[in-house]
Image: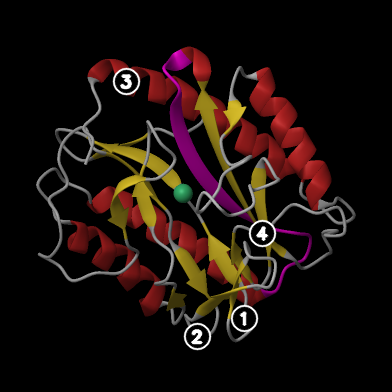
Amino acid sequence: MIIKSPKELETLRIGGAALAAIAHELAAMIRPGVNAAELDARAEALIRGAGGDPVFKGYRTAPEDPPYAGSICVSVNEEVVHGIPRAERVFRDGDLVALDIGMRHPARGGLITDMAVSVKVGAASENARRLVSVTREALDRGIAAIRPGMRMGDLGAAIQQVIENAGFGVVRELVGHGVGKELHEDPYVPNYGTPGEGIVLKKGLVIAIEPMATLGKPGVRLAADGWTWVTKDGSLAAHWEHTVVITDTGAEVLTRVV
Ligand code: MG
């Protein structure tokens, strides 16, 4: 577990604010008729324009695996995360689009922030609307519950409770993570847990918290493209993510528009 210095936190704060502004600009582009490749091209232009690198581009799960081709992940409807932004994926009225974006700042020590938002396209169903808002609430309530000295299981339980109380499924196969020097650092940050269990959240720890919730059963599987995770039962999924740092009194969101 890497504890970031005050100087590193200052650069993460600047990078996170820039990333959040880009994510919000991209989210505003999501409407019927726009395709995922257009969103990806715009994302790369905005990231490079901000002096950053799209950290997902070229990412490999294992050294022998093919590199990820996109700058962002665009996961639609039953896709949970890691959807590849293809031109054939044209957004339609009623879709639920999750946009995941990470940026490295070479000029700022190469530090990385990571975030995701879920967006309803046009007139989404009541179910989609609730799923998006409950998943967002789970992220917000998890962050609000953080105190230094709290355990990872307490955070996971806080997130899990919001999602399951609403009758939705908590994805378990995919979890949040430490972030900053690398895209994925220790520790794992599950969206479920048992209070009092797990590692202690220490001041200066930077983590990406990313609840993924499903309208139906919580099971997910990897699609044939080798990247995209989809719900096993084909039900809708939503995803929200912030990069946060544990502080003296709680947690500070680094990926927030300032
Ligand atoms: Mg992440």
- Based on the displayed image, in which of its 4 quarters is residue 249 positioned? top left
Name the residue tied to disc 1.
235
Indicate yes or no: mark 3 CB to ligand 1 under 8 Å.
no
The answer, for residue 183, to whether it is visible in the render is yes
**Which badge, 3 or 4, is on the more N-terminal residue?**
3
How crowded pointer 3 is (Cα within 10 Å; few <14, some 14-19, many 20+) is rated as some
Q: Are marks 2 and 1 in contact (CB under 8 Å)?
A: yes
Q: The residue tagged with tag 3: helix, strand or loop?
A: helix
| Amino acid under disc 2 | Lys
The residue sitting at 32% across, 62% down in the picture is 190
Which circle marks residue 83 in the picture? 4
Q: Nearer the viewer, mark 4 or mark 1?
A: 4
Residue 32, compared with residue 46, is above or below; it is below
**Which badge, 2 or 4, is on the more N-terminal residue?**
4
Q: Is residue 187 magenta?
A: no
- Percent position (x, y) of residue 173? 42, 71
Q: CA distance from mark 4 to mark 1?
A: 16 Å
Q: The residue tagged with tag 2: helix, strand or loop?
A: loop
Name the residue tied to disc 2.
217
| Amino acid under disc 3 | Glu
- Percent position (x, y) of residue 244? 34, 39
In the image, 73: left or right of 136? right
Name the residue tied to disc 3.
8
In the image, 239: left or right of 7? right
Magenta-highlighted residues: 108-125
Q: CA distance from mark 2 to mark 1?
A: 8 Å
Q: Are marks 3 and 4 in contact (CB under 8 Å)?
A: no
In the image, 76: left or right of 7? right
